[in-house]
Image (cartoon, rainbow, N blue to C red):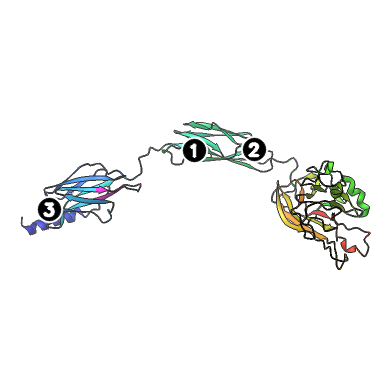
Amino acid sequence: MTKMKKYLFILACAIMAFACTPKVNPDNEVKEYAGSRASVELSTTDRIPAEGGTLKATVHRSPAFTVSAPKTADWLSCAVADSVVTVTVKANQSAVARAARLSVIDKELNISVTSFEVVQNGTEKDIVRKNLQVSTQSIIAKAEDTSASFSITSDVAWTVSSSNPAFVPSPASGEGNGKVTVTFPANAKTEEVTAEITVSTTDEGVMAKDLVVTIKQEAAVPDNPAVKPAPGTVLAEWEFETAQSEALRAGGFEKVSLEDDNLPGNVGNPYVPSQVSGKGKIEYYNGSDKSAYSTKKHKRRIGSRGEPCIYGSWKDDYFTWTAPAENDAPLAAGTKIQLNFALRPNAAGVMRDWKCEVLDGENWKELEAVKLEFHPSAAGTAADPKQVNAIIVRSATLTKDTPYACFRFTCTSQFNSAGEELSELVKGDALRFAGKYLEATEEDSYLQVPENPKIMVVE
């Protein structure tokens, strides 16, 4: 065969060989073109492992040759020595296998006379799929229930955990099929309780290794359901006036003895009752130890004009205004309540800064703070007052059912109402719950408040 005929014949064979795109096949495949005497003998027909390796290809019955690899096969390199091609393959970081067909090129004719394929595994291992299932993903328990169960269908080992320590799964571990029983206390609260029970495995044969069963325990139905009184309903009202003094003393608010007054919560629960309407209370609590101070500097009393007074208030002390709804029913979420009253320091030594909070469910929600004023250098007239009434209006919408309306005021600093920092209690300086007293003279009528203190529903 002449050189030209040989060229044309082999060229035709090469065109036919490259008409098909090579695919990854289980075994390294050697292609020999019709009419070509060249052949390739591979050192192994196994795939190259994912971590990389080498493959040797011995080329038989071929003139001088080179090896050509696709441009995309940058993951391998070739070295030719005599008739042996050494292919070095890099590690495959992909999960899928990859392949490249290498051509043996006749140097004289510059055409492929034979080819062979290099196939490399991916990182994904052949995993035997296993089973882990739960019978349900959600369980609704009643408030009085104390246990709930679900089944596990599996052929692997598993463990069970709980997001809520009060919900205890048993057994905590197992293998294969099983039944899990979760025990918990009855719910006495008026809020739903939730726990996530997680069934887990570390077995590689399971795709979803964590399965969650959510248990929702219904809220308890209260014996006295929450109510939302009509807007304008007054839950409690007080009148601070001389003629009401005895009625205001009925709750035992007027006490001097440190033996009673210096303990947290105030022994005997003294309070100022809402003598106009409702079952409201004003209560004062000691937030600090005052046993080292004179009883004359620390006391509570109802003043001559029927005004509750506190002597010796100090940082962390607090007072509350409370009022239940009719029949002592809790107030329903969405109820907007409001407190109206007035405070007045009768001298500079009264504490200035008071934090205001409202009870919302079981938690306290902070409202706008109160800052009291006393002007020592003033003339003490309506035009230039020493004593200044702080008219306080605070309202809040409850986000949860709440046992009763309750506003709390806590002293937050040891600055007095003249702006000076104090280091000890001041004798005779009184914090007054200012009232709408009737015996006011022209000289002090400006100290009266426009209306009685009250807690009411506004929405």
Assign a secondary structure to mark 2.
loop
Tell me the distance, in whole angstroms, between the alpha carbons under discs 3 and 2. 86 Å
**Residue that label 2 marks:** 142
Q: Which of 266 and 139 is in front in this view?
A: 266
Judge the density around disc 2: few (<14), some (14-19), many (≥20) Cα neighbours within 10 Å. Answer: some
Does the segment drawn in magenta span residue 97?
A: yes
Residue 200 marker: 1
Give the amino acid at mark 1: Ser
Disc sitting over residue 54 in the figure: none
Counting from the top left corner in percent of width and height, residue 447 is at: 87, 61
Q: In this view, does 151 lie above or below 92?
A: above
- Residue under the image location 7 percent in, 58 percent down: 3
The amino acid type found where label 3 is placed reads Ala
Label 3 sits on residue: 64
Which secondary structure, mark 3? loop
**Residue 353, above or below 30:** below
Q: What stretch is highlighted in magenta?
A: 88-101
Rendered image quadrant of residue 71: bottom left
Q: Quadrant of residue 375?
A: bottom right
Q: Tell which circle, 1 or 2, labels the residue nearer the N-terminal end.
A: 2
Alpha carbon separation for disc pair 1 and 3: 62 Å
Q: Is residue 273 visible?
A: no
449 left or right of 126 in image: right
Answer with mark 3 or mark 2, whichever residue precedes in sequence.
3
